[in-house]
Amino acid sequence: MHMRQEHGVSIRQGCKTVGLADSTYRYQRREKDDAEIIDALGTLIEKHPSVGFWQSFYRLRLQGREWNHKRVYRVYTSLGLNIRRRAKKRLPARVKQQLFQPEAPNQVWSLDFMHDSLWNGRTFRMLNVIDDYNRQVLRIETDTSLPTLRVIRVLEQLKEVRGLPNMIRVDNGPEFISHRLDAWCKDHKITLAFIQPGKPTQNAYVERFNGSIRRELLNAYVFRTLNEVKEKAFQWQEDYNHHRPHKSLGYRAPIDVVP
């Protein structure tokens, strides 16, 4: 441009002088409209948030889109989609259910977890299983870890000595929403009833029980070992089932309530 204005040199002569191709000088970048690609990628990622670029690209190809992969990748990175995304876990919608009052044992069991720690700071968990009919404690399973398979094992053990309920009421903890527990309940024709997130009163029987065991056992003793917790929990369970009067049961112990 300077050579043309100051010396009147033509474009061809100027390019030849500086060793620049004439076509390169005259080239003008054409802006491409990527709105369609942006919309297509946005729709795809919203539906499949965990897929990467090549999975996205070939999905678009199967939809009949014939964009060059370089162009798609340019748009893909400009949208920040190449940054690993952490998909938000979503719970299925939970329908509000009235707290069902059973009329016989083994109609509804309630399960819930509790947490506490030993004297040395090591944490442990408790899985509490009660029969909603008479509030009887069926099991207090205690350990440092209680995954879904352990929950199923407890239920299998209870099946051998007591049978199984028609319904099990639980919250939305990861051990309870597991597909393994869901499959096990379906195999045994048990309805797995979930309370709504943040609504513990929908599982009021076991929540009330948790409050009692928290006050009378976990907050009352300092435990040095896990075996101490298990031993005291068993003693507390025996007293609760056989000797503790409940106002809601007409001041009878759970074991004395028969249909």
Image: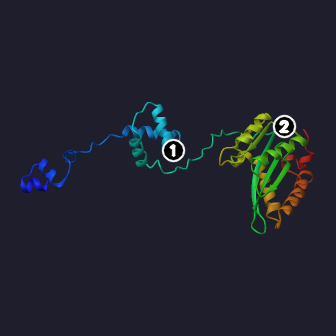
Q: Nearer the viewer, mark 2 or mark 1?
A: 1
* Residue 251 x, y percent position in the rendering: 89, 50
Q: Is residue 37 among the parts visible in the rendering?
A: yes
Residue 52: give its label: 1
Q: Image point 52% across, 49% down: which residue?
A: 85
Disc 2/disc 1 C-alpha distance (Å): 54 Å
Q: Image point 45% across, 33% down: which residue?
A: 61
Q: Is residue 249 above or below residue 104?
A: below
Q: Is residue 122 left or right of residue 232?
A: left
Q: How has the structure been colored for display?
A: rainbow
Residue 103: give its label: 2
- Quadrant hosting residue 221: bottom right
Question: Counting residues from the N terminus, which is met first, the one under dot 2 or under dot 1?
Answer: 1
Q: Image point 70% across, 39% down: which residue?
A: 97
Q: Amino acid at mark 2?
A: Glu
Q: Image point 19% across, 53% down: which residue?
A: 19
Q: Are marks 2 and 1 in contact (CB under 8 Å)?
A: no
Q: Amino acid at mark 1?
A: Gly
* Residue 56 x, y percent position in the rendering: 48, 40
Query: Of helix, strand and loop, which one carries label 2?
Result: loop
Q: Residue furthest bottom?
A: 120
* Residue 177 x, y percent position in the rendering: 69, 44
Query: Of helix, strand and loop, which one carries label 1?
Result: loop
